[in-house]
Amino acid sequence: MVVICEECGKVYKLDAEKLKSSMKGKTSKIKCRVCDHVITISLDDENNLDTSSGNIQHVPFQSQHDTNDQMADESETDVSEESPDNQEEDSDQNETIANKIDTDLVETKTSKKKSVSKKTSGIGLRTKMFFLFLVIPLFLMAGSGVFSQLQMLKLASDITFKSTEVVKKLAEQSIIDKAKSVASQCSIFLKNNPDLNKDDFYYDLELNRISIQEVGTKRGYTALIELPDPDKNEDHFIIWCHPDQALIGQPLLPAFKKALGSSYNNFKDVINTLRKGGGNSGYYTWTDDKGITTEKFVAAECIEQSKYMIISTTFIDDFTEPIKMLEKEAHKLTENTRNINIVILVALLLIIGLSITIYGYRLSRSIGKLTEAADRISVGELDVVIEIKSNDEIGALAEAISRMQDSLRFSIERLRRRR
């Protein structure tokens, strides 16, 4: 059989036959080890344990774990038996216990007026929710966004750089091939016209058409230059076919010296190398009338069996400009993507922050109400009304506290009736 202490609710499992055999008289008393409450068990006229007083209750089902715990409690329970000769002493003891219960109830009712709900210490629930669901995701998303942005910029720069290098190599080869092609055509023309005087080169339409051709875009061109004799310096490179008529018959290097600026020596080295035969090429800078300095590439090729050469030159930007435009578009697209991500991130943070604020406020308010109700119940105020309607765990907790409140109220009413 199972005995439940009416004072604290402690459950004891006892052997009914052993208890009846150990009883001396009609009654036996058991003292609760938790609250020192005395439980009286008596025999009725048919020699059965009396269950009418409510001291003995039968539990319909118990798990093995609970049974083991109760058997362990039984082994620790002090069971004291008294004979009918000590009934007067038991009566005095019961009266003392009843007085003690009355005193405890009075003290409980008095103390509830002085009870103050314990304030929460440390970080609150809403602060933790903001930190866990807003601050940490913010840093993670911001870090991921910055990393993605840097990677996109790096990718665009790498692709542009490598593409520019490839295009420059192709442009260089194209300019060199152009010089060789024009030199070959001029060589054939001069062989077929051996009597043509160099002073008439510019006025010969066929030679002009062959020797002056576009390179790359309209800013690039080829020109026919006379090589100086071995005993003469580089000032005797004379221009005979050139898009600018004013330069006809003028020395090449002095005519371009001002525009070449600091790269004059580079250009002179490229031209002078042609005296040794073969072709040559290289970069130099060109400053226009507006003072804008731009990089150019020149390729020179000697005309076979003659003292003339062809130079082919153009601005390298004519080939790389489309790649640079793509780079600018890639950076612009990356910036637009970054701005869109920032807008999405801000909107997401506002939604998350608002959700956490509303839900966190409702959650903390419900928990606060339950905490206040539990605190008031703990000091004996059993008429507290718990007004929380929720279908989640908070609602289940509120129902559990309400059931505990009803159970305590019922237990106290039974104690009062027994007195």
Image (cartoon, rainbow, N blue to C red):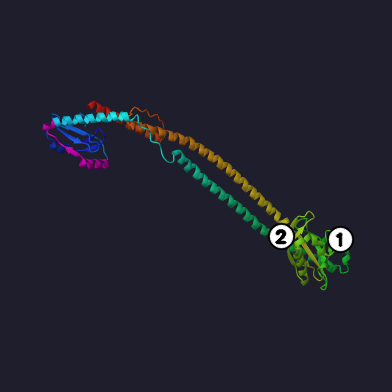
Q: What residue do we see at 67% from left, 57% from top?
A: 164
Q: Nearer the viewer, residue 8 or 71?
A: 8
Q: Position of residue 303 (x, y in %)?
A: 80, 68
Q: Nearer the viewer, residue 146 or 374?
A: 374
Indicate yes or no whether the magenta region holds residue 75.
Answer: yes
Q: Position of residue 326 (x, y in %)?
A: 67, 51
Judged left or right of residue 201, residue 43 is: left
Q: Residues within 10 Å of mark 2 (few under 14, many from 20)?
A: many
Q: Nearer the viewer, residue 350 or 331?
A: 350
Q: Which residues are magenta?
A: 63-87
In this rendering, the label closer to the viewer, 1 or 2 = 2
**Residue 168 image-quadrant placement:** bottom right
Q: What residue do we see at 43% from left, 33% from top?
A: 365
Judged left or right of residue 396, residue 254 is: right
Disc 1 marks which residue? Answer: 205
The quarter in which the N terminus is drawn is top left
Q: Residues within 10 Å of mark 1 (few under 14, many from 20)?
A: few
**Residue 159 image-quadrant placement:** bottom right
Could you give the CA–CA distance between mark 1 and mark 2, rounded to whole angstroms?
28 Å
Q: Tell me the element at label 1.
A: helix
Judged left or right of residue 90, residue 380 is: right
Residue 130 visible in the shown view: yes
Indicate yes or no whether the magenta region holds residue 196.
Answer: no
Amino acid type of the residue that numbered disc 2 sits on in the rendered structure: Ala
Marking on residue 171: 2
The quarter in which the C terminus is drawn is top left
Amino acid type of the residue that numbered disc 1 sits on in the rendered structure: Leu
Q: Tell me the element at label 2.
A: helix
